[in-house]
Amino acid sequence: MTDGVFEDPANTREEILAATYRCLRNHGYADLTMQKIGDELEQSPSLVYHHYENKDALVIACLEYLLEHFEGKLGRGRVDDPQDRLEEMLDWWFATDVDNDWHAFLTTVLELRAQAVHDPDYRAHFTRSDRVFKESLAAALRTGIDAGVFQECDPDAVAETLQTVLIGAILRRSSTDADVWLEEVHGELERYLESRVYKN
Amino acid sequence: MTDGVFEDPANTREEILAATYRCLRNHGYADLTMQKIGDELEQSPSLVYHHYENKDALVIACLEYLLEHFEGKLGRGRVDDPQDRLEEMLDWWFATDVDNDWHAFLTTVLELRAQAVHDPDYRAHFTRSDRVFKESLAAALRTGIDAGVFQECDPDAVAETLQTVLIGAILRRSSTDADVWLEEVHGELERYLESRVYKN
DNA sequence: CTCTTTTGAATAAACGTTCAATCAAACCCA
DNA sequence: TGGGTTTGATTGAACGTTTATTCAAAAGAG
């Protein structure tokens, strides 16, 4: 689901973003150097400075690019049943198979959140990105409520809660060794939805 | 609740840990330099190397010290009513007043979790620390179940879930500007506990 | 006098960033 | 059309800064 975003770069700027994305995904932010981006690009690191102000501006541009791409995709869910649709969205985040690029990138996003602690540009990005994903969850909830298949819950509050759990799970998964708790949390989340959102 | 941990250092090693803690709390990990630790200590940075292997070993020693301190405190809750006790534990993490040292330190812990992505020593620490806090939550739940005031829920699963929400909330709070969602999530967490844990 | 503690200066590596210098292509004008 | 000019892309080498870390020597305690 992640890949395919940068599959056909239209110009040098996009090629740089694509290379940055691959570097971030493969090596993480801590090991991201302009040299590595240059290697991935098979061009000189200094070329990057012709197109982007500096390293962090580049990384943020990459995040923004991805976010815009997702914004385009999020609206068009093909699944009709609201419950299936919501579950699909949760599974996307929970994705349990560890050895894939998507999970690697989610881990890197955490490193970038740590930058947001001190860097207002990163903060601004994640503020916006949280809003976007929360809205997409809330929209799915509203659809179900309007269709009469979900309870009359507060879609904004539930969406924020779901997102908080998902982000917490990703953080814990990326920063600890154990994984057993993940299924337990997934199960509890299911129970929460059953009591608060789904109708039985 | 945090302060008081390092209030009376017994020796140079502990003084160094205390200085490290204050630096982390006040400036965060990204801006932590041996120089700053030396300044806080009012001694030369090179002194630190006489007592600790290197910078990260020092930081981890500081985290371990704090964790041991908490392990000692967590058992002795003075509150008798299990529900009050649980709520107290949650409030401790949720602590909404932003301008305090405790919240600043929680934010720094996130930066350190980001290190855990690549550094096995940090990973080992957070694996252990998650276990400790989860166990203390699970213990509180079991107390309530055994006393018959909580439902027959799965204390481990609920504890893992609570911790995941709390960590997610801290991460979101530290890496974004908006804060409105926090109360919504707190409210939903309350509803979850009502449906799953508390008896009505 | 000896052992530990403490210091200041020096080391060394890593990186982001700058910049003057090429090169190719597009563009313009006669 | 064609020669000269402008523009943008690209490079390699160098700069400068930041920081963890080392170490030989001074200071201090017992």
Image (spheres, coloured by chain):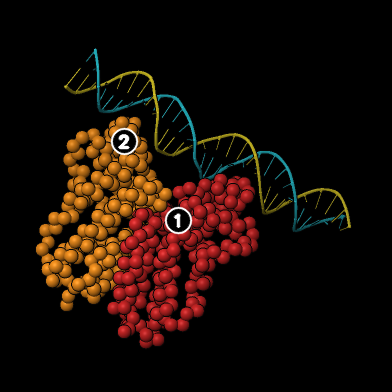
Chain colours: A red, B orange, C cyan, D yellow
In the picture, measured across the screen, residue B146 lies left or right of residue C27, that is left
Question: How many circles with numbers are drawn on the protein?
Answer: 2
Q: Chain of mark 1?
A: A
The residue that label 2 is drawn on is B52
Residue that appears at 43% across and 74% down: A88
> How many other residues sit within 10 Å of disc 2, few (<14), some (14-19) or many (≥20)?
some
Q: Position of residue A178 (x, y in %)?
A: 34, 57
In the picture, measured across the screen, residue A150 lies left or right of residue D15, that is left
Residue that appears at 38% across and 61% down: A170
Q: Chain of mark 2?
A: B
Q: Position of residue A59 (x, y in %)?
A: 51, 55
Tell me, for residue B70, which label it has, or none: none
Q: Position of residue A53 (x, y in %)?
A: 55, 51
SS at badge 1: helix
Q: Position of residue B44 (x, y in %)?
A: 32, 31
The residue that label 1 is drawn on is A108
Q: Is residue B93 above or below residue B45?
A: below
Amino acid at the residue labelled 1: Thr
Within the image, what quadrant is residue B21 found in?
Answer: top left
Q: Quadrant of the C terminus of chain A?
A: bottom left
Cα distance, mark 2 to mark 1? Answer: 30 Å
Amino acid at the residue labelled 2: Tyr
